[in-house]
Image: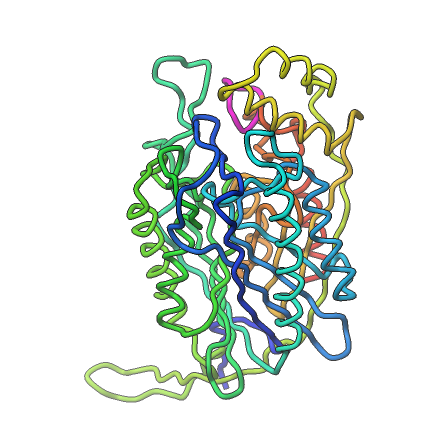
Amino acid sequence: MIRKTRFPGLRARFGVSRWDITPGLDVCAKNWGASDRWFARGIHRPLTGTALAIADGSAPPLLLLSLDLGWWRARADADRLRLALCDALSLLEENLIVHLTHTHAGPLLDSAAPPEGNPQACTAYLDELRTACIAGAKAALDDLRESTLLFHTGACGLATPRDFLDPGDPQRFLTGFHPDAAADDRLVVARVFDDANRTRATLVNYACHPTTLAWDNDLVSPDFPGAMREVVEGCTEAPCLFLQGASGELAPCEQYVGDTATADRHGRALGHAAMGLLEMLAPGNAETVYAGALESGAPLALWNPAAGELPQTLSAHAPAVELPLKPDLPGLDEIRARMAESSSGFGYERLVRQLRVRESVGDGTTSAERIWVWKLGAGGLVGVPFEAYSIFQRELRAECPHLLVLNIANGHLGYLPPAPLYRGPSLYTVWQTPYAEGSLEAVTDLAKKSLISNL
């Protein structure tokens, strides 16, 4: 009998939950240096948190949270949420991933927000976020039941490269659409079915910066992931987790606008691409079995879907890596001195971000970091607390095609550009990051080794 795996997957117990994390309008929402607005005036779409719990036998469960938030300004704030979840739910640190979808139209995630940004409201929001995430995660763990997950891969044309050499200054790159470069358009989806063949959850993993909405937008918004979920959830009647991929150099061609209709259009494009893949997944069709030949106008090969034996293996690892910091990275005293000379504008915003990063990595020459590698049956997941370029996910998927790759997982401090970009014209992702040349390659090697040894 000829059998062929069509959609790899996992047999385990799954639980899912969804909750609201929309901030009040008194919470600072200034995420663009070009913006002169500290607060939003309304809500485009609610921000949500979604949790997926996965368990097998008596082993500790895995827990994945996807939050409609931007990025952490300081390591301490990310760690405070992550460790609170571990403590409250008795989770192993390697078994928890808190992932941010990276909207640029959400609340400022900084417990040390500037006076103009109403720091008391920012701190209160972070406290409320921890409470809500603990409750939401507990609901997912309480919802565990036997289910099947199937993976599928395809493509979507939303993402485009965004490192564009300035036509007026060949010594610097601009951050915006590059019309002559190709993007990594890989789209990885997964669908979870219960034993009554109902969809319990879907996952959509795609690499594209949610920067449709920018300084002219004055509404809180998840950007394009909001409309994407609306499309998918309308078809599947189940929560959808958006997972931001390795999108360091990827963004929509049409971006930096104030019109939320553009973000919704982008979301529908991604949502329909995802549904084109998700519709192929159905209970009992993980394999296809050759059923013989039939003579007709042509001799026909007959294949029938079959459930197959899905693996039930789960594992979680969080290997560490010591990354070198850039030798010219300014120290805390130097950054604070520059801030005293420039108290407003985009230059000051850059200095504030640089200060938070330097406070997080310390004044040494290296920074100890971790990545998260999960085995999920015939597929897997890799989460990193960086904004890695897409070459990271391309190289990892050469080892494991059905791999979910997540940027901004369990923290965020900076970009990971490929080494050659450190030696070219001035580039935002290079001068923003605290990590030295070769850091992306070191993280990639570590992830590959962990994938090969554990998958």
214 or 176, nearer to the observer = 214
Q: Tell me the residue at 35%/37% (across/down).
A: 255
210 or 285, nearer to the observer = 210
451 or 272, nearer to the observer = 272
Image colouring? rainbow
Q: Tell me the residue at 73%/21% (across/down).
A: 332
Q: Residue 426: within the magenta?
A: yes
Q: Residue 111: within the magenta?
A: no
Q: Tell me the residue at 64%/66% (across/down).
A: 135
Residue 401, x across and y down, in percent = 53, 58
Q: Tell me the residue at 41%/48% (across/down).
A: 223
Q: Is residue 382 above or below residue 29?
A: below
Q: In this view, does 1 lie above or below 162?
A: below
- Left-right relation of 35 to 85: left
- Image quarter for residue 112? top right
Residue 321, x across and y down, in percent = 76, 41
- Image quarter for residue 329? top right
| Residue range of the region highlighted in magenta in the rendering | 423-430
Residue 358, x across and y down, in percent = 70, 27
